[in-house]
Image: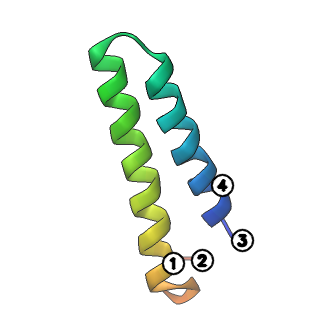
Amino acid sequence: MNYYPLLIALGLLFLAGSFLVTHATGRIVLVVLSCVAFLVAAIMTVLGPAGVPGG
């Protein structure tokens, strides 16, 4: 399965949500989640299917 578009979409969704949230802690959490989603997508892109268990 190719999850890269889903991870990128989730990252963008979290990032967009962070602009809508007014609470500082919630905004930080959403930005961190978006960074994690982008980071996982980048790592999976670099490793390729061989680096993903069961991929």
Q: Nearer the viewer, residue 54 or 9?
A: 9
Q: Is residue 1 left or right of residue 27?
A: right
Residue assigned mark 4: 6
Question: In x, y percent, where is residue 33?
Answer: 40, 40
Against 20, residue 6 (above or below) is: below
* Three-letter amino acid code at the position of disc 2: Gly
The answer to whether mark 4 and mark 3 are in CB contact below 8 A is no
* Three-letter amino acid code at the position of disc 3: Met
Residue assigned mark 3: 1
Provide the secondary structure element on which disc 2 rests.
Answer: loop
Which residue does the image show at 63% across and 49% down from the upper left?
Answer: 9
* Three-letter amino acid code at the position of disc 4: Leu
Residue assigned mark 1: 45
Q: Earlier in the sequence, mark 1 or mark 3?
A: 3
In the rendered image, the residue lying farthest to the top is: 23
C-alpha gap between disc 1 and disc 3: 13 Å
* Three-letter amino acid code at the position of disc 1: Thr
C-alpha gap between disc 4 and disc 3: 11 Å
Against 11, residue 6 (above or below) is: below
Viewer-nearest of labels 4 and 3? 4
Q: Would you call the spot at circle 2 few (<14 residues within 10 Å), some (14-19), or many (20 or more)?
A: few
C-alpha gap between disc 2 and disc 3: 10 Å
Q: Earlier in the sequence, mark 2 or mark 1?
A: 1
Q: Earlier in the sequence, mark 4 or mark 2?
A: 4
In the rendered image, the residue lying farthest to the bottom is: 50
Residue assigned mark 2: 54
Which residue does the image show at 34% across and 10% down from the upper left?
Answer: 23
Image mark count: 4
Viewer-nearest of labels 1 and 3? 1
Which residue does the image show at 72% across and 71% down from the upper left?
Answer: 1
